[in-house]
Image (tube, rainbow, N blue to C red):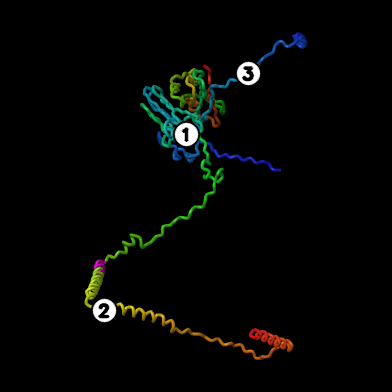
Amino acid sequence: MVWPQLSYSFDYTFGVTNNAAAFGNTWSMTPQYLGANGVDGMEINGIIYQYTAVKDKEDDFTVTVQNEKEGGGYVFQDKEDWSQKYGMTIRKSFALPYTPLAIFKEDGGAIVTTGTGSVVNPQVVYLHRFNRCFDPQSDPNCTGYVTPLPPKPPEFDMYDALEDEFVEEATKETDQDLIDKEEKEKEESEEKEEEEDLEILLAVGDNPLTMGDDFTQSSIIAQMNAALNISSYYAAKIPSIVYNEPLVMKEQKSLGNSKRILRSLGQDQLHNQMVEAQYQ
Amino acid sequence: MKKLTITLSLMLAFSPVLAENIYINGDVSSRCSIVQDTAGRWGNPSANVLTTLPASGGQVPIIRFDYTLANAYYASISTPISFSSSPSLTDSTVFTGVVSVTQTSSSDQSGYQAASTTPAANTRQYGLTIAGSTWFSATSVATHGGGNNTPFPSGSYTGIVVASCIAM
């Protein structure tokens, strides 16, 4: 007997936000003001506000509590005209259809006043429900949760000290005398090579065979060197060791029966005849 | 009389039905409700005084009136003039009380206090002319012993604030 199992998902939690006006007469619709649930997944369905209007009865004074709408306009706006009235503490509540937080302009919460008077002890709270599975990846128990792939291993930048400008700077030669000396030696070497090349060029017209001799002699020396290098392998002697058989069989006679030996000899003879028959 | 009744019954039993009572039912839900917003508590700052003032360890009771009709009701609130329960008292007790509007749901209700009346010494009555909700506070002070400052006997004391909606 199989009983059908029903499963229900209670993804919503209901609650009231923190006092959005706790830090002043303007607020943003963010977790900083609304509490931890003030993120995507929150849907607001009510607003309760309270404040005390401090004013003289004769003064004109208006107070507007509002939430601007993303893209223009207002999600909520309520104006109270205290002109020619006694200052008083007021508390009002409003119902809204469930409105996603994204509809509210982030920095659009405000208590705006005009005229002479002030607002003290303002409190603005939002009734809401929160869908913790708005992002299914936020909880493994959410429908649609996909097990994430393991993270890629971090890529490290290999440090090459030879390319480190600070290392180069630190190892830079600082002994000016030594630098000058090296440069001087280098210059002298280059000058000497130039002089030798010049001498050779000047000698080409007078004695061209000298250059030919140099080339010929160089090739002969190279061949001699190659021969020497190879001959060393031919002349090499590889040392060897002779391992003598230490086992000596003292009794040299066969232990088989005589008939079997005779049969074996007969087979040998027959074998020899067959081999010889191939050459006849 | 009893006999006549029986005769009438017999006649009805043999006659066709000539009349029937048709009932009309209806319910009226209150357009004015009273809710205790905050319970009251007396503090005892001195031996012969009980007071709801927070500075003296008391708590002022708050009553909320919710009414959906304008100009239909009076809110009447009375502070205690006697203990509803207390230890046996050997001396007289003087009660004083103050009722005031502490909070409204509309700035148009801000004139309620100024327009209120006192039909009795311990009672204040407000004309609820603007539909909505209004919160009232009722402070109460009880002083025992008159000029002798006789201490209250130890025990539990209870007083009652009576709040009511009265049709205009």
Residue position for label 1: A125
**Does dot 3 land on a helix, a strand or a loop?**
loop
Which residue corresponds to mark 2?
Answer: A209
> Residue under circle 3?
B25
Q: Residue furthest front?
A: A280
Q: Specify whether A151 is left or right of B11.
A: left
Q: Which residues are magenta?
A: A175-182
Q: Position of residue A41 (x, y in %)?
A: 50, 39
Task: Give whichever of A111, B90 is nearer the camera.
Answer: A111
Indicate the secondary structure of the residue bearing disc 1. strand
**Residue at 63% from the left image edge and 40% from the top image edge:** A6
Q: Mark 1 is on which residue type?
A: Val
Query: Is A278 in front, or is A262?
Result: A278
* Chain letter belonging to callout 1: A
Sort mark 3 into few (<14), some (14-19) or many (20+) by Cα contacts within 10 Å: few
> Looking at the image, is A11 positioned above or below residue B17?
below
